[in-house]
Image (spheres, coloured by chain):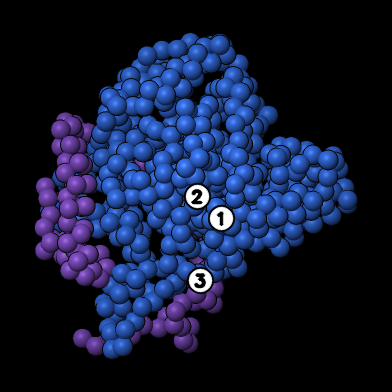
Chain colours: A purple, B blue
Amino acid sequence: MSVNKENVAKIASLARIKMSDAELERMVPELNQILGWVDQLGEVDTSNVEPMTAVIPNTLRLRADEVNADPKTGGDRRDDVLANAPAAEHGFFGVPKVIE
Amino acid sequence: MTELTNLGVAAIRDGVASGEFTAREVAEAFNANVAAAADLNAFIVTTPDAALEAADKVDADRAAGKDLGSMAGVPIGMKDLFATKGVQTTAASHILEGFTPQYESTVSQNLWDAGAGMLGKLNLDQFAMGSSNETSYFGNVTSPWRKPDGSNTPMSPGGSSGGSSTAVAARLAPAATGTDTGGSIRQPAAFTGITGVKPTYGRCSRWGVVAFASSLDQAGPMAHDVRDCAIMLGAMAGFDPKDSTSLDLPVPDWEANLNSDMKGKKVGIPKEYRMDGTDAEILKSWDDGIAWLKDAGAEIVDISLPHTKYALPAYYIIAPAEASSNLARYDGVRYGLRDLPDGAGLQDMYAETRAAGFGDEVKRRVLIGTYVLSAGFYDAYYNQAQKVRALVAQDFENAWNECDVILAPTTPTASFGLGSLSDDPLTMYLNDVFAVPASLAGLPAMSVPCGVNSDGLPLGLQVVGKAFDEQGVMNAGLAIEERAGFTAKPEKWW
């Protein structure tokens, strides 16, 4: 499969990366080279294979259903969470006005 | 007195413990080497005071007769992918420039708890995406190695842990942390004549490590020899409730159990790794490795890993797919860069921020990942790649019926000149062709230096083992190390 400029523009918009026309033009052959190469995976018969979901068999752990059950995974870190925000006010992240 | 910066982890630990020298003397010596090596660009941030502070604590603990940790007095370099409390953490990306974590990654905390100190944050490929250290926002890292032909061509230290490999090879640090998603510890170790171990997936906590491809990312040590790696891995590893894929297993005493006697062990030689066009000197180094392991008492068996050819293309679907999801968090809202043109709305802010913050290789991989996960292509690309991944893992499972460890080259070539491959993403990707299969299967693997080629550049051999058998991998690595007699060092020019 291959992509054209319109496809790449669509993907870039899905990925929320602004790209100029020149960048889109440059990306088309680069992506097509990579996509053309990964197409060889189609040769492999996988009709009886389950897709791998975990490399090492592992069961997900559950913690007790209470606030801060384990201090190592607990909360109460609002100020730490906001410390690196480009804009934060009144204990919240700040974003540009959204009007629908 | 011994040149302290020529010492490795074990020698420093033992010398500090016995009082031959102080931790402060060691930290000062490495701080001086770091400060004098700006030409290599191995560090994004240096933290000489942190190294001294940790050293002083070790010296005080020793004077007070307290027990010292397994890394006591050893100053290390920290790949700038590990969050370090109060010290800028960037993943070598503009989008995280100025980000100062309010927390410490589990692996780095484990190392500080064991008595290690931090010399600084090491440069890397941006978001660990690259095999040459040419994608960092903070500039290329240059390998301390040069061809002795007088051309002075700057060589690649490998990637993505290229700051780590350069720092250790140039004696700016006795050891450094690395992370390996598809070869990012092993390939740079091979390029710079040092030793690097990628443990079993889940051995080292991923908590606080900037995520690239979460099902593949694993931290590990990079140091001068196998023993040093065994010590450092022991300090890094361990169960962590903060990482849902952390292995809830005791950490073995890898150092105490090192044993290079390979009697009764079978070493598999995968025929599919003998690819057309592989450098003759790489093949020769592989033959040397076979002879050395035989000499150590191992039985050599030919094995087949039939899906090897498909591992790399599967990786270049799975890793970008996971990266595109993981990197969705860089939105200009919670941390890092925000690019908000006048009058722009929220969606514009996302797109402008990510355009300004991500480098070209990161954008390329995010786009590939977005594409292979998008409606209509998910089954053909992502699901097929995950099925092929299962087959690659099955190949290894089958191989373990015939052998205990697998020996292969680490890379298809030695280091190359910076800039010589950067116009061609696909050729660059092929550098990891021998490293990626073990990553896809989550298996422990390491690179050990085995010699230099006719250009005077180091080569590495790779040992891959069964899940949880880091000991078997490092024992085989030690058997190679003892016989390779690798003593080559880069001549100082920086």
Q: Chain of mark 1?
A: B
What x and y, as percent, mark residue B268?
Answer: 42, 18
What x and y, as percent, mark residue A79?
Answer: 54, 77
Residue at image location 32% in from the left, 38% down from the top: B430
Q: Label 1 belongs to which residue?
A: B39
Q: Which mark is residue B98?
A: 3
Q: Chain of mark 2?
A: B
Residue at image location 48% in from the left, 87% down from the top: A90
State whether residue B200 appears in this view: no
Figure check: A78 above or below B276:
below
Q: Nearer the viewer, mark 1 or mark 3?
A: 1
The answer to which of B221 and B155 lies nearer the viewer is B155
Q: Is B135 left or right of B204, judged from the image as shown?
A: left
Tag 3: amino acid: Gly
What x and y, as percent, mark residue B152?
Answer: 49, 45
Q: Nearer the viewer, mark 3 or mark 2?
A: 2
Q: Is A22 left or right of B485, judged from the image as shown?
A: left
Kindly check if marks 3 and 2 are in contact, taking CB atoms under 8 A apart as contact.
no
Figure check: A65 above or below A86:
above
State whether residue B347 appears in this view: yes
The answer to which of B55 and B389 lies nearer the viewer is B55
Q: CA distance from mark 1 to mark 2?
A: 8 Å
User: Are the residues flagged by discs 3 and 2 from a single subunit?
Assistant: yes
